[in-house]
Image (cartoon, grey):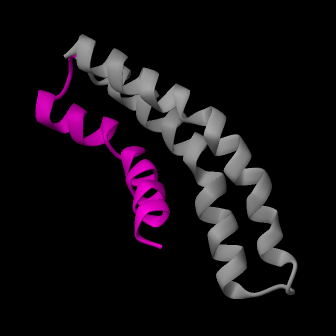
Amino acid sequence: MKLFLFISQSIYALMLVPWLIVWGVSFMVFDSGLSLWGVGIMIMVTLYPIAVAVCSLLSWIYVKKMRPLSIVAINLVPSIWIMAFVLIIFVF
């Protein structure tokens, strides 16, 4: 379990570098004016490092208190952002 947490959180930490680039570029969504869609995109992009920190912290705190499946589920929440980004890159 600890090896899984270490590997997955290392991947999340490595994904913070491209996230920083995407976050900087995401401000261009406001070039055409302020819109609900643009604000939503910025909120979702900005929440990635917060999700990584919170889920990593919770998974290490609960590593001995909860079932392994629950810890895996908590730890995989930030992967939603990674999968969405990859999907957007390859589909659109």
Q: Is residue 2 left or right of residue 12?
A: left
Observer-nearest residue: 68 or 81? 81
Find residue 53 and report its horizontal and vertical position in percent: 53, 33
User: In the displayed structure, would residue 49 be above or below residue 40?
Assistant: above
Q: Quadrant of residue 67?
A: top left
Name the residue at 12% across, 35% down.
69
Find residue 38 and report its horizontal and vertical position in percent: 71, 78
Query: Where does the magenta region start and end?
Result: 64-92
Q: Quadrant of residue 9?
A: top left
Q: Residue furthest top?
A: 3
User: In the displayed structure, would residue 18 be above or below residue 61?
Assistant: below
Q: Is residue 58 left or right of residue 3?
A: right
Q: Quadrant of residue 70?
A: top left
Taking the magenta stretch, the answer to whether it contains residue 90 is: yes
Q: Is residue 50 left or right of residue 33?
A: left
Observer-nearest residue: 33 or 71? 33
| Quadrant where the N terminus is found in the figure | top left
Find residue 40 and report its horizontal and vertical position in percent: 63, 74
Q: Is residue 63 left or right of residue 51?
A: left
For the question of whether residue 70 can be seen, the reply is yes
Find residue 27 and report its horizontal and vertical position in percent: 81, 64
For the question of whether residue 67 can be seen, the reply is no
Name the residue at 25% across, 12% down.
3
Observer-nearest residue: 52 or 61? 52
